[in-house]
Amino acid sequence: MRKNLSKLAVSLVLMSVITAVSFAQTKESPSGGRLEGTWNVRVSIINCQTGGVIRSFDSLGQFMVGGTLLDSTSGTAQALKTPGEGVWDHTAGSNYRFKFKSFTFDAAGNYTGYTVIQHDATLANTGDSYESSGTLEVYNPARVLVATGCSTTTATRFGF
């Protein structure tokens, strides 16, 4: 009988740990849905001082369980850059942040540096859309910052 109670206690502890880990990995927001999934993203490069839109283009973002992300964009030809790879996390309520990096190349295939994009995002209460804003930093191959910029996004879930 004691053996069975010990096994039951161990099983309950393991189930509690698994549940806690699973909950932590979903990054659920108490006031909105979750950010995990694939998103249709409309990116607007903006003037940092005036907020005026310089240009806009479509991207596809994928936020994965565990806090990693992938970004593909129509803003730069894929032959001239790698997909963006990065991280994201839940900050509070319906708020998240993400950061990703991609490497850039010239038309001859020579490495020209990399870009780092960092945004703060707010997920809608429905969990089906978000808006974000943030910065981009452009570095040369020597890791020297050569340009900065600002951008905003609006996104909707990609799905059936």
Image (tube, rainbow, N blue to C red):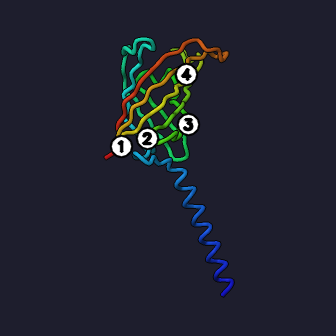
**Residue 105 vertical placement versus 38 (above, below):** above
What's the distance in space between the residues labelled 4 and 3, CA to CA?
14 Å
Mark 4 lies on a secondary structure that is strand
What's the distance in space between the residues labelled 1 and 3, CA to CA?
22 Å
Look at discs 1 and 3 and give the one toward the viewer: 1
Q: What residue type is labelled 3?
A: Val
Q: Are marks 4 and 3 in contact (CB under 8 Å)?
A: no
Q: Residues within 10 Å of mark 4 (few under 14, many from 20)?
A: some
Mark nearer the N terminus (2 vs 4)? 2
**Residue 66 vertical placement versus 21 (above, below):** above
Mark 1 lies on a secondary structure that is loop
Residue 142 rendering spot, x and y as whole percentages: 67, 15
Mark nearer the N terminus (1 vs 2)? 2
What's the distance in space between the residues labelled 2 and 4, CA to CA?
27 Å
What's the distance in space between the residues labelled 1 and 2, CA to CA?
7 Å
Mark 2 lies on a secondary structure that is loop
Q: Which of 70 and 104 is in front in this view?
A: 70
Q: Name the residue under label 4.
A: 115
Q: Which amino acid does label 2 sit on?
A: Ser
